[in-house]
Image (spheres, rainbow, N blue to C red):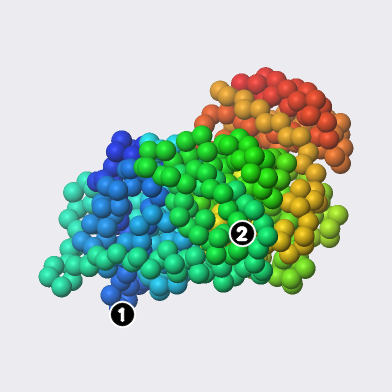
Amino acid sequence: MGRLFGTDGVRGVANADLTAELALGLSVAAAHVLAEAGTFEGHRPTAVVGRDPRASGEFLEAAVVAGLASAGVDVLRVGVLPTPAVAYLTGALGADLGVMLSASHNAMPDNGIKFFARGGHKLADELEDSIESVYEQHRTGAPWDRPTGAGVGRVSDYDEGFDKYVAHLIGVLPNRLDGLKIVLDEAHGAAARVSPEAFARAGAEIVTIGAEPDGLNINDGCGSTHLDLLKRAVVEHGADLGIAHDGDADRCLAVDAAGDEVDGDQILAVLALAMREAGQLRGNTVVGTVMSNLGFKLAMEREGIELVQTGVGDRYVLESMKEHGYALGGEQSGHVIILDHATTGDGTLTGLMLAARVAATGRTLAELAGVMQRLPQVLVNVPDVDKSRVGTSAELAAAVADAERELGSTGRVLLRPSGTEPLVRVMVEAADIEQARAVAGRLADVVKSALG
């Protein structure tokens, strides 16, 4: 697997890359690293452990729980709950550590481990590095310092986590959803119980699809990565809107009454205006990434809202929000962070807030999302090139400059070296899709000739 920790924890094919031994070892290492950092000082440590419905999550949960308890950490098992629920409960219960077993939107054979620090925040990079280093030391033979007797951790089920999390979601809603008919696609994932319960308690009439997880069908042709089922269901049921989550429910995409997609940029635009109206948009700023659609940037400029753009990845969005005190940020993929109410992206919370705006204004989702016009976006991957020279090639710089002059203020170009593969991503936006395709094709040819 190379370096174990990626941008979103440790992921791999369950029982091949991500084994029970690895899950156990990382959990013991996490306990030791946090103890050495002083996190457990003066009290008996506690961890919250949750998972999505993947079959592999059953044995991986057992391994994580065993590792933590063997290191002297008391464990509260919350069962199948969304990633943001585990983050919330870690903070709400005053736990020292949270662990979520999920591979998010990935296919069922994959799984992952994500650690949360006290308060429900993502572990600092240096702590992840330490956990990986300590794990590797002990994997190759160094003995663990193990507690015995009453020093071992105790394990219990925390069944109240479901209701506590749903109550939190309902408690932060600005208004009820009475009168709205909403279709929910749960991706046969971690929100299959939580999301319908929350929307129903908020007053919406709900129709659910993708809400029968069996451990094998998570993300299978449904959820935020496969919107066709939701689009059809919204139209067939005459619903006001549809909400789609991914496997661990940290994302939300939407569909309007006509069955048209409302992506993460549009959701951010709607919520930014709502939060500004309520006096909650701190710094009059929303945080996006360099991949945010140019239409989103133009809409925010028109509305007088500042847009801060970070590197691609919700971790960078969150870092910027925390550093500067911003309240709203997210990605086109639907990973939206409302920092006053969540420490990570929360798909159910995002969907509730979006529906609340529809209910409060009496306007359709299509009307609200119309605040921004999505510009056509073309992405071309150019493989087998020297991606390290993207920023230094004079030939490439000249081609980009020519393209930017051609596109003017209604288009843009972005060249990004892949973080994991030997390829360069060429992204072009323009008012016209054919122009975007033509410019992207020309730039891809220059990338091949200049960097090949």
Q: Secondary structure at mark 1?
A: loop
List the single residue furthest toward the left.
149
For the point 52% across and 38% down, the residue is 222
Quadrant location of residue 431?
A: top right
Which image quadrant for residue 169?
A: bottom right
**Res 312 seen here:** no
> Where 288 falls versus 227 (above or below)?
below
- Which dot, 1 or 2, sits closer to the camera? 2
The quarter holding residue 98 reads: bottom left
The x, y position of residue 229, in whole percent, is 58, 37
Reading the chain from its start, which is encountered first: label 1 or label 2? 1
> Marks 1 and 2, Cα distance to the nearest angstrom?
46 Å
| Placement of the C terminus among the 4 image quadrants | top right
Can you say which quadrant of the picture contains the N terminus?
top left
Tell me: 207 left or right of 93.
right
Near-viewer residue (233 or 190): 233
**Does 172 sit left or right of 21 as displayed?**
right
Secondary structure of the residue carrying tag 2 is loop
**Frontmost residue, 219 versus 416:** 219
Q: Amino acid at mark 2?
A: Ala
Q: Looking at the rendered structure, which numbered label has been put on residue 7?
A: none
Q: Residue 159: x percent and y percent?
A: 35, 65
Relative depth, front residue between 396 and 249: 249
Q: Which residue is mark 1?
A: 42
Decide which of 93, 324 is in the foreground and name it: 93
Q: Amino acid at mark 1?
A: Gly
The residue drawn where x is 67% and y is 19% is 449
Task: Confirm whether residue 370 shows in the render.
Answer: yes
Q: Which residue is mark 2?
A: 204
